[in-house]
C-alpha cells in the first residue's frame, strides 16, 4: 500500500519528455532505427553497424537526441563479458496531451474520493489491457532474444506493449525490469493508489492477453530513485540480450 502524500520526490520514474524539437536528417535516421528496435534499447555500436557509420558519429547524434528529449539513455544491462557494459538508448515516450492529462487527473480525483476507488482503477486497467492487442516486437538490431510462437517470451511481449502505453525501461535481468519513464507519473504522485492501481491492472491484463498468468507479475511502485519495477515469475522470464 502506497502512502498518499508521503512520496519521496526522488523516487519513481521520470515523466514523458516535452514536445520534441526539430532534428537533422542524420538524427532522424537514427531515431527511425530506434523506433523499431528493442524496448530495452540498443547500443551505440549496434546503431553504427545498422547504419554503416562510425560509432563516434552515432554517439554524437544520440547525445543530441538525448539532450533534446527524443531518446532515453538507459542503464546498461549487466553482462558476462569483459569491460564496462555500454549504455543503451530507446525512443522517449510521447507526452500526453493537456486534455488527456486533465481527464486522467479528474478521474483519479473522483476515484480517490470513492469507496473502493483504487480497486475500481485496477479493474479498469485490467479490462483496458485485455481488450487491447498485445504487441509482437520488431527488432532491426538483432539484439533481442526470441522464443515462442510470436518470437518473444510472454514477458517481452508485455514490455513491448507497455512501451506503446508510454513506458520506458532500464536495467533488466531475467526476472526484473526497471521502469524509468511513466506517462502518468505526475498524476501518480498526487493519486498513487488510483494511478498505480490502474497500471497494476494494465500489467496483469497484458500478461493475461499474452497467455500468461496475471499473478506471475508484480508491479512495485516508487521502489527506488528514478524507477518503479516489474518482477516476473520464472514462468515469464525476460529474454536478456
Image (cartoon, rainbow, N blue to C red):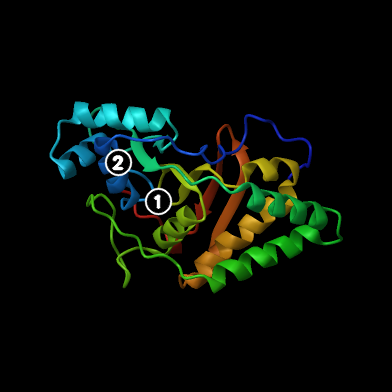
To which residue does mark 2 refer?
A: 28
Which residue sits at x=35%, y=38%? 89
Residue 72 point in image, percent of width and height: 42, 37
The residue nearer to you, when weighing 162 against 225, is 162
Which residue sits at x=60%, y=68%? 128
Residue 43 point in image, percent of width and height: 28, 38
Image position of 160 with respect to 32: above or below = below
Location of residue 201 (image quadrant): bottom right
To which residue does mark 1 refer?
A: 174
Q: Residue furthest front?
A: 22
- Marks 1 & 2, CB-CB < 8 Å contact: no
The residue nearer to you, when weighing 104 against 174, is 104
Image position of 148 with respect to 137: above or below = below
Which residue sits at x=34%, y=49%? 35
The residue nearer to you, when weighing 168 against 22, is 22
Which residue sits at x=57%, y=48%? 96
1 or 2: tag closer to the N-terminus: 2
Is label 1 or label 2 in front?
2
Where disc 2 sits, the SS reads helix
- Along the horizontal axis of the image, is 222 left or right of 153? right
Mark 1 is surrounded, within 10 Å at the Cα level, by few (under 14), some (14 to 19) or many (20 or more) other residues, namely some
Image position of 104 with respect to 53: above or below = below
The residue nearer to you, when weighing 18 against 58, is 18
Amino acid at each position: 500500500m502506497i502512502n498518499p502524500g508521503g512520496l519521496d520526490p526522488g523516487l519513481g520514474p521520470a515523466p514523458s519528455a516535452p514536445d520534441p524539437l526539430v532534428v537533422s536528417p542524420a538524427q532522424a535516421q537514427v531515431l527511425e532505427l530506434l523506433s523499431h528496435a528493442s524496448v530495452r534499447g540498443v547500443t551505440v555500436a549496434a546503431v553504427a553497424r545498422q547504419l554503416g557509420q562510425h560509432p563516434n558519429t552515432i554517439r554524437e547524434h544520440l547525445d543530441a537526441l538525448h539532450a533534446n528529449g527524443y531518446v532515453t539513455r538507459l542503464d546498461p544491462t549487466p553482462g558476462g563479458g569483459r569491460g564496462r557494459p555500454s549504455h543503451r538508448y530507446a525512443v522517449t515516450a510521447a507526452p500526453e496531451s493537456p486534455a488527456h492529462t486533465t481527464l486522467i487527473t479528474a478521474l483519479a480525483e473522483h476515484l480517490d474520493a470513492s469507496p473502493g476507488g483504487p480497486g475500481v482503477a485496477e479493474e479498469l486497467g485490467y479490462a483496458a489491457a485485455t481488450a487491447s492487442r498485445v504487441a509482437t516486437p520488431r527488432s532491426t538490431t538483432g539484439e533481442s532474444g526470441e522464443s515462442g510462437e510470436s518470437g518473444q517470451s510472454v514477458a517481452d511481449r508485455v514490455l513491448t506493449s507497455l512501451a506503446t502505453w508510454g513506458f520506458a525501461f532500464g536495467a533488466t535481468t531475467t526476472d526484473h525490469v526497471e521502469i524509468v519513464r511513466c506517462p502518468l507519473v505526475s498524476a501518480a504522485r498526487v493519486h498513487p493508489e488510483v494511478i498505480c492501481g490502474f497500471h497494476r491492472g494494465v500489467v496483469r491484463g497484458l500478461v493475461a492477453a499474452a497467455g500468461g498468468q496475471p499473478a506471475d507479475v508484480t508491479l512495485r511502485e516508487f521502489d527506488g530513485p528514478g524507477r518503479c519495477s516489474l518482477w516476473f515469475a520464472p514462468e515469464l522470464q525476460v529474454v536478456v540480450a
